[in-house]
Amino acid sequence: MGAVKVIINKELKVAFNSLLIYIAYTAFLCVTGFACWFSGKNIFSSGQASLSNLFNVFYWTLFFLIPALTMKSISEERKDGTFELLFSKPIKTWQLIMGKFFAILLQVVICLALTLPYYITIASLGNVDHAVGFCGYLGLILVSGCYISIGMFASSLTPNTIVAFFITFAIEIGFVLLFEFIAELWGSGFIAALFTYLSIGEHFDAIPRGVIDTKDLIYFISVIIIFLALARHYICKNRF
């Protein structure tokens, strides 16, 4: 695990020495702040201290934020030709992938931590179930893990960061919107049940309400493992 820690530290240093991460954080906080406090569906419109709208805003904002954080993860290494330098050291492919994955996940966790003043403000306005709040943030981290793994897979396919961004975005649309649409189109039966299960929203929706089901955890972990394995496959394929 020593190599993984080295890669995490290296990735975090690069990220926080870049203007992109600060622009991403600022955009995230501005969008979520506006949606939570000033939009037509702000938290005051419900007349109660509810966390559901807060987590729903975070859910959709991460949908757009994470492709921007992951688009350079692998593609820039290929573009700059630094893979040969990395693999000349005693680093295995899975260590590189895990290091980059956890580095980006930590960036997202820090971003979510910056939203705690929103949570504290809502809690001060009324009675809030803090267990539900914990579950909401846990659900967002799990969803972020899925998006990050998808983004790293997309980044492993091309040295072009913009192309990687749009590939990530397209796959996310499939998991968040398209699968749910297909399930509704079929209405019932095996196909409908299959695409309902594949939809990320189907597994996220219950978690911010304080319901953590084993099948949802298995789903998120499975999606992360599958896409990281695919990223590893394409890195090995294009290693030299």
Image (cartoon, helix red, strand yellow):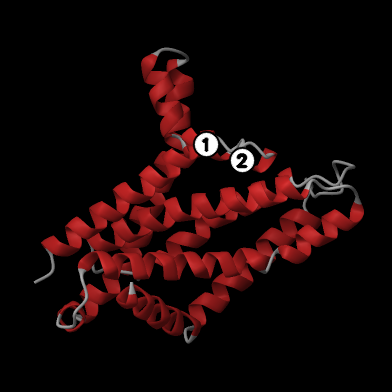
Judge whether residue 42 can be spotted in this image. yes
> What residue is disc 1 on?
203
Quadrant position of the C terminus in the picture: bottom left
Q: Quadrant of residue 235?
A: bottom left
48 in relation to 67, above or below: above
Q: Is residue 103 found left or right of 44 in the rendered image?
A: left
Residue found 73% across the figure and 64% down from its top: 116
Q: Residue 10 carries which label?
A: none
The amino acid type, in three-letter code, at marker 2 is: Ile
**Residue 25 rendering spot, x and y as whole percentages:** 59, 71
Label 1 and label 2: CA atoms lie apart by 8 Å
The amino acid type found where label 1 is placed reads His
Badge 2 crowding class, 10 Å Cα cut-off, few under 14, some 14 to 19, many 20 or more, is many
Count of marks overlaid on the render = 2
Most distant residue in the left direction: 240
Whether residue 60 is visible here, answered yes or no, is no
Question: What residue did someone put label 2 on?
Answer: 207
Q: Is residue 190 or residue 103 the one in the foreground?
A: 103
The residue under the point 18% across, 58% down is 234
Q: Measuring 70% from the left and 64% from the top, which residue is drawn there? A: 115
Measuring from the top left, give residue 2's x and y in whole percent. 33, 77
- Where residue 179 appears, as percent x and y from the top left, is 42, 32
